[in-house]
Amino acid sequence: MRILHFSDPHVTIPLCHVPFGKWLGKRAIGGVNLLRGRYRLFAEAEEKIGALVSFQREQQVDLVLCSGDYTALGLRGEYERALHCVRPLMNAPKGYINVPGNHDLYAGDTLQEDRFFTYFGDTLQSDLPEYQVDGPWPLVRLIDDTLAVVVVNSARPNPFPWRSSGRIPQRQLLALQKIAGDARMNQRLVCIMTHYTALLEDGTPDSRLHGLSNYHKFLVACAAFRVGIILSGHIHRCYTVKVEASGQQIFCAGSLTVTGKEGFWLFDVRGNYLQATPGTWNGERYELDTTAAVILNIPMKK
């Protein structure tokens, strides 16, 4: 099984195309940040997603995962472009699974119009709907007899411009623990995915204003899975870190498209082993950095 995990492509549209009424509140600050350099950092987002489509085909990827932040300001035009770009990835043999990022829920209108569901609703079907307690979350996909993907949503609108933190609702965490106790998880490697990362690469939590506010409760819930890895984005650096309390590994995919730090993870699951190899951008195409590959033992049998 070959799994591609990417995050934070941040597709933008020309600011002159944004209706005047959409610049009220936090989105005005976001627009200023784009003009001050962020727009330039993601200027080639669409081209780089296209290169990822080529990579996915060349590498014969079975399953594609995205941990959110398709957009910069959560605008309809951005959603439309992002969906157009990633749609070919949705044809992966084992499917396509995703979760919104905080930029996808950037302002109140994104929730009022249920914008993520409008554009990505076809990707939100769960194989275990009995565990859904918060819209489509937690979402569970049973990929085959050896793999499952469990997704919880940690993104939310932050009305204050200085705050971009996330939080997983308690009802989702309780459902996550129930899923861990489901017998169907016992013989599977479980990929637990959300947008916000629980730990930075040095093993410490992100800041209060930028990170996952209830990261500790999330890690406790994840520890209930017998064999699991944790997938995230939000931090625009591709890295992996071990959770000391549980021994589980966190893989942050960074940003697929941010200039100078482009990255993602490619997972190969073979028997009782998982090889995680980071992807990099060479200026023209994506390639694998096999020198930085990580190999984990995943004891599938009791």
Image (cartoon, rainbow, N blue to C red):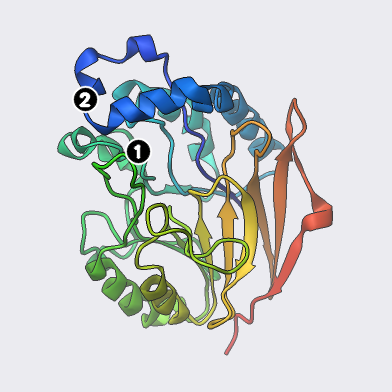
Identity of the amino acid at label 2?
Leu
Q: Local crowd at mark 1 within 10 Å, few (<14), some, or many (≥20)?
A: many
Q: Local crowd at mark 2 within 10 Å, few (<14), some, or many (≥20)?
A: few
Identity of the amino acid at label 1?
Asp
Task: Give the percent coordinates (x, y) of residue 150.
Answer: 41, 63
Q: Nearer the viewer, mark 1 or mark 2?
A: 2
| Residue shown at 43% from the left, 44% from the top | 68
User: What is the distance, in whole Å, between disc 1 and disc 2 at their CAs?
Assistant: 17 Å
Look at the numbered disc 1 and give the secondary structure of its residue: loop
Q: Name the residue under label 1.
A: 104
| Residue shown at 46% from the left, 49% from the top | 67
Answer with left or right where residue 229 lies relative to residue 129.
right
| Residue shown at 26% from the left, 54% from the top | 136
Task: Give the percent coordinates (x, y) of residue 243.
Answer: 56, 75
- Work out which residue is located at the far left of the displayed protein and give it: 112
- Work out which residue is located at the far bottom of the displayed protein and give it: 302
Asked if the residues shown at circle 1 and circle 2 are in contact, with their CB atoms under 8 angstroms apart, the answer is no
- Tell me if I can see residue 88 in this picture: yes
Q: In this picture, is 50 found above or below 94? A: above
- Work out which residue is located at the far right of the displayed protein and give it: 291
Answer with left or right where residue 144 lies relative to residue 53.
left
Residue 162 image-quadrant placement = top left
| Residue shown at 31% from the left, 15% from the top | 18
Total residue callouts: 2
Look at the numbered disc 2 and give the secondary structure of its residue: loop
Q: Name the residue under label 2.
A: 24
Toward the viewer: 9 or 136? 9
Task: Give the percent coordinates (x, y) of residue 107.
Answer: 25, 36
* Residue 244 marker: none
Task: Give the percent coordinates (x, y) of residue 262.
Answer: 65, 38
